[in-house]
Image (cartoon, rainbow, N blue to C red):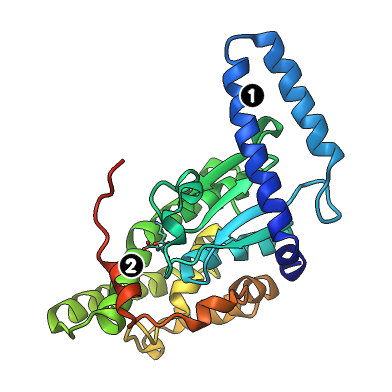
């Protein structure tokens, strides 16, 4: 499905950004009049149903993506849910993340982001921040994000743990171990130790349950890409047998494999040591708004 989706990428890009623009105009126009709003949203719904995408009623979701652990979270979820999608590469090594059209949907100049042409009320919606995207898709499909409050809290705790802990700490471990121009022992130790601590927390959690929240969920999808890079983070997986069992289970899932194999040709050519790439990615400061 991903390959099919990529092929129709350009066509859907212009369609969906036109739609997002026209829908915000529609909202502004209808804010003053309730009657028009009802008929406008009815019309939008009708149009959404009349134009199904990729053989399903759901029109393809635009996935703004680069093949990294954060990008994989969403390609995995889309594959797990069987949602049609179109992958739009955001080449973060050449500055696509600063293009005005991307900042309009992701003001933090980070991928992933999505645009769902069939958002709430049948109108387009864009979402940035991988955790928020996973929650959105989980609510939309009713999959991998339980509605029951007790079960939902279990998922959310581990999703936030990934967003605020594992992701940022593993990201810093990658940075100081592989990308920093100097090898700084303090920084390397600090983040390698912190990732080690976090994998210990995960290992203990997984001792008596198959997945982080009990059942397979968006929390596991958020973690798997980062966890699969344990070697790059200076870890020894033999220390964490329950974590290893969980990781092997996740990596054996066909949807996880498809999500993590969603390739972008240019990504394999990026040289992180290129001074231009280094400057662009690692010397960012506030931009004039
Ligand atoms: N908290 C964000 C982090 C996303 C993130 O850091 N994305 C990186 C790639 S993994 C990015 O887009 N970097 C572009 C840049 O640094 O300008 C999320 O989870 O969505």
Asked if the residue at label 2 sits under 8 Å from ligand 1, the reply is: yes
Numbered circle sitting on residue 26: 1
Q: Residue at x 84, y 42 (%)?
A: 51
Is 200 drawn above or below residue 34 in the view shown? below
Of residues 193 and 123, the one nearer the viewer is 123
> Residue 240, position in %: x, y?
40, 83
Q: CA distance from mark 2 to mark 1?
A: 37 Å
Is 156 drawn above or below residue 181 in the view shown? above
Quickly name the residue at label 2.
281
Q: Residue at x 60, y 39 (%)?
A: 125
> Residue 110, position in %: x, y?
42, 57
> Residue 165, position in %: x, y?
33, 62
Taking the image in four quarters, ligand 1 sits in the one at bottom left
SS label for mark 2? helix
Residue 126 appearing in the image:
yes
Of residues 125 and 249, the one nearer the viewer is 125
Of residues 5 and 152, the one nearer the viewer is 5
SS label for mark 1? helix
């Amino acid at each position: 499905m991903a390959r099919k989706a990529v092929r129709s990428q350009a066509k859907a890009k212009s369609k969906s950004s036109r739609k997002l623009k026209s829908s915000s105009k529609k909202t502004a126009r209808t804010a003053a009049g309730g009657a028009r709003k009802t008929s406008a949203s009815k019309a939008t719904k009708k149009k959404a149903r009349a134009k199904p995408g990729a053989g399903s009623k759901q029109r393809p979701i635009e996935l703004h993506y680069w093949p990294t652990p954060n990008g994989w979270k969403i390609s995995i979820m889309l594959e797990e849910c069987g949602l049609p999608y179109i992958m739009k590469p955001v080449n973060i090594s050449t500055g696509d993340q600063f293009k005005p059209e991307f900042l309009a949907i992701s003001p933090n100049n980070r991928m992933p982001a999505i645009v769902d042409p069939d958002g709430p009320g049948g109108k387009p919606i864009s979402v940035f921040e991988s955790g928020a995207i996973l929650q959105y898709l989980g609510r939309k499909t009713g999959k991998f994000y339980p509605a029951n409050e007790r079960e939902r809290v279990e998922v959310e705790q581990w999703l936030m743990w990934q967003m605020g802990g594992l992701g940022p700490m593993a990201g810093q471990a990658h940075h100081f171990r592989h990308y920093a121009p100097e090898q700084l022992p303090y920084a390397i130790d600090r983040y390698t130790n912190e990732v080690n601590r976090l994998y210990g927390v995960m290992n203990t959690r997984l001792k008596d349950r198959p997945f982080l929240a009990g059942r397979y969920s968006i929390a596991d999808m958020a973690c798997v890409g980062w966890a699969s890079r344990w070697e790059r983070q200076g870890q020894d997986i033999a220390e964490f047998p329950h974590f290893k069992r969980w990781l092997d289970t996740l990596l054996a899932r066909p949807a996880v494999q498809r999500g993590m194999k969603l390739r972008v040709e240019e990504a394999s050519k990026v040289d992180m040591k290129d001074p231009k790439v280094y400057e662009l990615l690692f010397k960012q400061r506030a931009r004039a708004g």
